[in-house]
Amino acid sequence: MPVTGMNARSLISPVGITRFFEIFLSCTTFSLVADAKAFSGSYGTWCMFSWCFCFAVTVLIIVLELTELFPRLPLSWDDFTSAFSMLAALMIFTSSIVYPSVYIHGTCSTSVCARQAAATAMSCLCFIAYAIEVGLTRARPGDVSSFLSTVPGLLKVFEAYVACLIFSLVDNGHSYYHLPGLQWSMAVYCICFILTLLIIILTIGQCLAYIPFPLEKVLVGYNALAVLMYLTTAVIWPYYSFKGVSRPNPCNSDCQWNSKLGVTFLTYFNLIAYIVDLVYSSKMVFFVTATT
């Protein structure tokens, strides 16, 4: 029976120490929120899930690296950890903004509010910790051994996450069904999300090597197509969403006008991400290839 060794060096490396901070901060955050009993509703549930999910996966990563069991998993470990650290940073960042915006109001004078404020501060520090891990594990220029640790790979995670946020903000009443422009916008969001998620899954699953065509150039072509599609959506979505519609007064957190405005800004963010992705991917494919 094979004996599993212990890799203590993984605990004292810069990445390992950073992960311990992530565990401590995320655990402290959801413990404070649970103690305050102030996370009811969909927004609170999402924030609580984000903190607990990042805590649990980070603990799992540390255990697998400590026991050196991760090489036995049928996946690219470096791609998986890079993608997760980027995803965790985005999730914690979102929670650090959403939670205080929804659950902290007015002057903070009660003990419950004090715990909520402390949880927000811990969440912000947790985001910084995950952002540091992203910086520590990011591939250096010229290193393409782990795609998801490169700038285009990290942008893929960002693009997929932003698309998920867009889906969460889309009108639950399906008001876009009768407007062709909004139907096209939803098609763009779905198509780009599915293809981007597929690239991430195939990369982590080490399946890209089995695809019988020049994948790098195909990715450049996909990024160019995504930029064009998002360009049209960046114009069409706000035009059809706000044409002849003024902001209602009052407009609370569940107001559809605010949700449509959020989708508009997220569309612009993803458009910028796809443009940067296209530039970096083109540089990696054409310029690096030309120099070699």
Image (cartoon, helix red, strand yellow):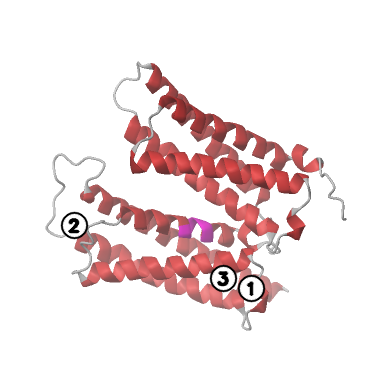
Residue 151 spot, x, y in % from top left: 58, 58
Picture residue at 68% right of the left edge, 64% below the top = 144
**CB contact under 8 Å: marks 1 and 3:** no
Magenta region, mostly helix, strand or loop? Answer: helix
- Magenta range is 156-160
Name which residue type carries label 1: Leu
Residue 56, image x and y in percent? 59, 43
65 and 153: which is toward the camera: 65
Q: What residue type is labelled 3?
A: Ser
Q: Does the magenta run of residues contain 53?
A: no
Q: In which quarter of the image is residue 120?
A: top left
Q: Say if residue 278 shows up in the picture.
A: no
- Residue for point 15% across, 39% down: 250
Q: Which of marks 3 and 2 is nearer the N terminus?
A: 2
Secondary structure found at label 3: helix
Secondary structure at badge 2 equals helix
Q: Is residue 133 left or right of residue 14?
A: left
Give the answer, above or below, for where 189 lies relative to 250: below
7 up-or-down from 82: above or below: above
Q: How much space separates mark 3 and mark 2, taking CA atoms?
A: 36 Å
Q: Give the residue drawn at x 54%, y 46%.
A: 88
Measured Cα–Cα span from mark 1 to mark 2 = 42 Å
Judge from the rendering whether residue 23 lies leftward or rightward of residue 261; answer left or right.
Answer: right
Q: How far apart are marks 1 and 3 (CA)?
A: 18 Å
Q: Answer with mark 1 or mark 2, whichever residue precedes in sequence.
A: 1
**What residue type is disc 2 on?**
Phe
Q: Residue 208 carries which label?
A: 1
Label 3 with label 2: CB-CB less than 8 Å: no
Q: Identify the mark nearer the N-term, 1 or 3.
A: 1
Q: Label 3: which residue?
A: 282
Disc 1, SS: helix
The residue tagged 2 is: 242
